[in-house]
Image (cartoon, rainbow, N blue to C red):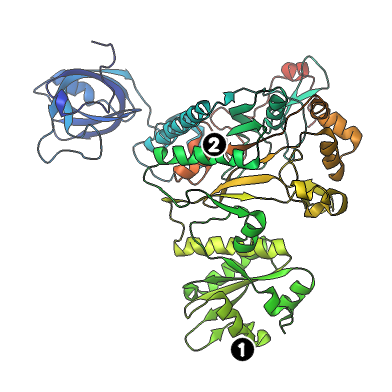
Amino acid sequence: MHKYRTHNLNELSKKDVGSKVKLSGWVHRRRDHGGLIFIDLRDRDGFTQIVFDPDVAKQALEIAETVRPEFVLTVEGEVRARPDGMVNKNIATGEIEVIVNSVEILNKSQTPPFEIDQDKEINEDLRLKYRYLDLRKERIQQNIMFRHKVMMAIREYFDKHDFTEVETPILIKGTPEGSREYLVPSRLHAGKFYVLPQSPQQLKQLLMVAGFDKYFQIARCFRDEDQRGDRQPEFTQFEIEMSFPEQEDILNVIENLFLEITPKLVPHKKLLYTPFRRLTWQEAMENYGSDKPDLRFEMQLIDISEDVKDSGFSVFADAVKKGGCVKALRVEGGGEFTRKEIDELTELAKTYKAKGLAYIMLEKDELRSPIVKFLGDDLAQKIIKKVGAKVGDIVFFGADKFKIACESLGQVRLAVAAKLGLQDKDVLAYAWVYNFPMFEEGEDGKLAAMHHPFTRPLDEDIALLDTEPIKARAVAYDVILNGNELGGGSVRIHERELQSKIFELMGISKKDAEHRFGHMLEAFTFGAPPHGGLACGLDRFVMLLRDEPNIREVIAFPKNQSAQDLMLGAPSEMPAEQVAEANVKIIK
C-alpha cells in the first residue's frame, strides 16, 4: 500500500464499501461525540469523514483526542456506508465514511490566525499576510483551480486555430505607453535601466514583422499604478496578434473564443447576446453613458437637448448653447427613492464632474421637482412623455459637455440598477464597442492616444489628421462584459510615415520618437505587413465568471491595495553593498 494515500479525498463512494484504504490530508473539522470522534479530512479535491471508535482501535482514538484543526494526518481504515439519515449530500463522499484502524500525525499546527473551515469576513491584510493559509479555504482554492481551467481552455482554443504561443521578455527598454513603469537598474551597464513591460504590445507587433502570422500569449504585465479592486502591480493578460487581418477577423476569433469556452466553464450562466451585441463608441456613450456599458438591463439615456435649448431653465439651455447636451434617465419605480438616496446619487454624479443632478418625480397628481417651475408644466410634461415615464417613476437629468453629461448620468444608471437589483450575476452580456476616437484631449490641450499610439485611424478619417485630428476615429475595439472592459485592441499602423505622423500629433518630437520608438519605426521599413490584435485581462475574466468582488480573490499571491506583499514582506530594504552593486544610490 502507498505510504500516504490510496485515494484522494473526493474519490470514495458506496462501491468502495469494505475496501481497505489509506488517506492523507488536513483536519478540517473535529467533532467529539462522547467516545466516538469524527473528523472531516480535507485535501485539494474534497472531504472524507473518518471515524475513531475505541472498539475498533483504541490507540487511534487516543491519538485523535490530541488532534486539532489543520493537523496533517495519515490514516488507514475500512470504508463503510453511512447509517440511514446520516448521508451528506453536499459532498462527493457523503454516502460513506472510513472507520480508522491506525493514524499517524504527520505534522501539527498552531491555532491559525483565522478559521479556515468557515467563510467569515476577515481583515484582508491578515488574509494576505497568511496567504498560504487563506489559500486552503475552499472558495479561494476553487478560484485558483478554475483559473487553471480557463488558461487551459484558452491555450487549447488558440492552438486549435493555428496560433503560435511565443514568450516575450520581461526585461525590456522603457518606452512609455501611458502608465508608469517599474524600473530595473542594470548592474553591468551603470546608469542604465530596464523596465518591466506594461504589455508585450511592441514585441507582438515585431513578431508580425518577423512573419509569425498568428501569435498568442498568456503574458505577465506590470504597471506601477495606484491600486484598486481590478488592478494589481503585476497582472496577467491573454492576447493575440494577426497578420493581414481586417477588424472583423480579429473580432471573430475572440468572440468565438468566448462563445466556445464560457458555456463549458460556467454552464449555469446565461449568455444574453449570441452573437455579441455591437455598439459604436458614440452609441455606447449616448445611450448608456459609458464606453463599457452594462447591457444586462436597458435603461437608456435619452437626449432632450433640442427640447430644452430655448427653455427658461438656464442650466439646461446654457449647456446646449455652449455645445454640450442634456440627457434624461428614466428610472422605473424610482419614485420610491428617499431624499437621502437622491442626495447620494447627486454626490456620485458630482464625482464625475457634474455640477449637480436634476430630477422630476412622478406622483399621482403632480410632478414633484424644484426644476418644474423653471421648465414650465407644458415642457415638463413633454419631456415626461418623451422618456416614457409613468406614475411612480423618477427622471434624472445631466446637462454639461457631452462626455461629462453622459458619464455622470451613466454612473447614476449603474447605481440605481444596483439598488433595484437589475444586475443578474447569472446573466453574461458580452458586447463589442468599436470606432473609438483616435485621440482625447488632455487638460494641457495636448492630444493623447485613446488606446495607444500604434492604433490605426479609419481609412476614411486619415484626412482628418491634417485638419481636425480630434474628430478622427480609430480601428479600435473593446470587448465588454457586464459593465467591465474585458479587453481591447486595434488594427495597427504598419507604415513608418503614418506612425511618425501620429507621434507628431501627440507632441512627441522626431528626436524623442527616435529615442523611444526607433526600433519600431525602423522595423516598419523592412516590409511590415498589415497587422492587428487584442489583449484581454485574464484576472478580470476569472473574477467576473467567479462572481468575486476583486481580482485579488483569483490570484494566488496578490499584493494588497498599497502594492505590498505582506506574506513575503516586499518591497523590502536591501543590503547596502547589493544596492551599490546595482549602481543605485538611495537618497533619504
Front residue (pair 203, 229): 203
Label 2 or label 1, whichever comes before in sequence order: 1
Q: Position of residue 188 (x, y in %)?
A: 78, 14
Front residue (pair 498, 2): 498
Q: Which residue is mark 1?
A: 377
Q: Is residue 52 visible?
A: no
Residue type indicated by callout 1? Asp
Picture quadrant of residue 495: top right
Front residue (pair 454, 456): 456
Picture quadrant of residue 62: top left
Left or right: 228, with 133 as reference point:
right
Q: Which residue is mark 2?
A: 538
Left or right: 174, with 286 as reference point:
right
Residue type indicated by callout 2? Leu
Q: Residue at x 47, y 33 (%)?
A: 150
Q: Decide: few, some or many residues near mark 2? Use Cα within 10 Å; few <14, some 14-19, many ≥20.
A: many
Q: Position of residue 22 (x, y in %)?
A: 23, 17
Q: Residue at x 37, y 42 (%)?
A: 267
Q: Is residue 377 visible?
A: yes
Residue 252 in the image: above or below residue 414: above
Identify the disc placed on residue 89: none
Q: Position of residue 199 (x, y in %)?
A: 67, 32
Q: Position of residue 472 (x, y in %)?
A: 77, 51
Quadrant of the rendering where the N terminus is positioned: top left
